[in-house]
Image (cartoon, grey):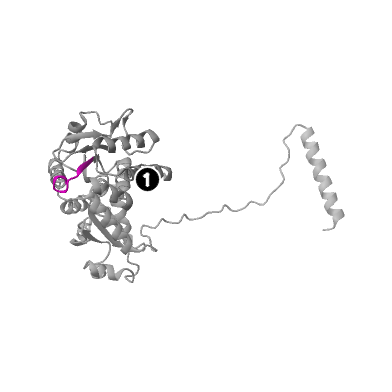
Amino acid sequence: MTMRTIALTVLLAFVATSAHAIAGGPPVATPTTPTAPTTSTPKEPQVYNESADANVDVAAALARAKKNHTRVLIQWGANWCGWCKWLHKTCKDDRDIARELSNEYEVVLVDVGRFDKHQDLMANFLADAKKQGIPYLTVLDENGVVLVNQESGSLEKPADAAVKGHDTAAVLAFLQKYQVPTLVAETVLADGLAKAKAEGKLVFLHFGAPWCGWCHRLEDWMATPAVAAILSKAFVDVKIDTDRMTGGEAMLKTHSDGKSGGIPWCEFINAEGKALVNSNGPDGNIGFPAQTAEITWFGEMLKKSGAKLSTEDQAALQLSLAASSKKK
């Protein structure tokens, strides 16, 4: 097509469009070549982190279990394994199982690849997943001792079930069987008081629950090596779980005189069980001290309790709280 032909074509099209518009009709649309809709299949999220170092993950889970008095549940599996994904989904979607895992277990998903990854860790825990198939479960106590190795076939629904998958009742029963025995709050506190008396220290009593984010912030701060080193000079750490310990909620009401204002709630007491000072400051419960006024009251708690900490140590704790708050 020549330039003259193109020009003539454009002119005729313009005249025709103008005449149509003048006559009151709608403008003529310029023909276009339809384009096929683009479709993309969303990538299925991976259940197992294929680049994770399971040795590191299990060690971290054991540290959490020791602090929280929980178990460690290792689920050996792989992203190519449909039953592994089904079990993970069951644990996530079933309300009772999800709560049990959140409260009582530190869960670690370990990718075994094509049974060519983390074989040393499996051997260490005597987990015969290669022979019995995946998903495969191992439960450890807080010291890393194997409590049970469990194939998952017995946790599945019957073969003739209308919908395949795992039996939620069987999974929950398995988890409940191996969870930590329920502790009694009064016994936990009594043990802490006895230790404080033997070591000439005070008790740092704090109340929390698995679902409480601020409680975890406080506990994580207290577990920081530099902070733990200072606190251990003057305090025995006693945590009362208001959800998981028998009498935990009642103890909180008693110690706070029903005025805790929520959790975390803390109290410094001497070895005879006498309350010295608590976290109810001028503006109410400081919880995890994050604001300036809250950190200031925590400093006052240290002073009022007579804790055997130097001025430098007390200042270091307050500076650590301020730094921790800035990171969030």
Nearer the observer, 105 or 197: 197
Q: Position of residue 294 (x, y in %)?
A: 35, 35
Q: Is residue 198 magenta?
A: yes
Query: Element type at marker 1?
Result: helix
Q: Which residue bears the numbered disc 1?
A: 320
Relative placement, left or right, of 106 versus 43 is left
Quarter of the image for the C terminus: give it: top left
- The residue lying furthest to the front in this view is 311
326 lies above or below 57: above
194 lies above or below 154: above
Q: In the rendered structure, which segment of residues is drawn in magenta?
A: 196-205
Quarter of the image for the N terminus: give it: bottom right
Relative placement, left or right, of 312 versus 268 is right
Disc 1 crowd rating (10 Å Cα; few below 14, some 14-19, many 20+) is some
- Residue 245 visible in rendering: yes
- The residue at 32%/27% (across/down) is 282
- The residue at 12%/45% (across/down) is 194
What amino acid type is highlighted by mark number 1?
Ser
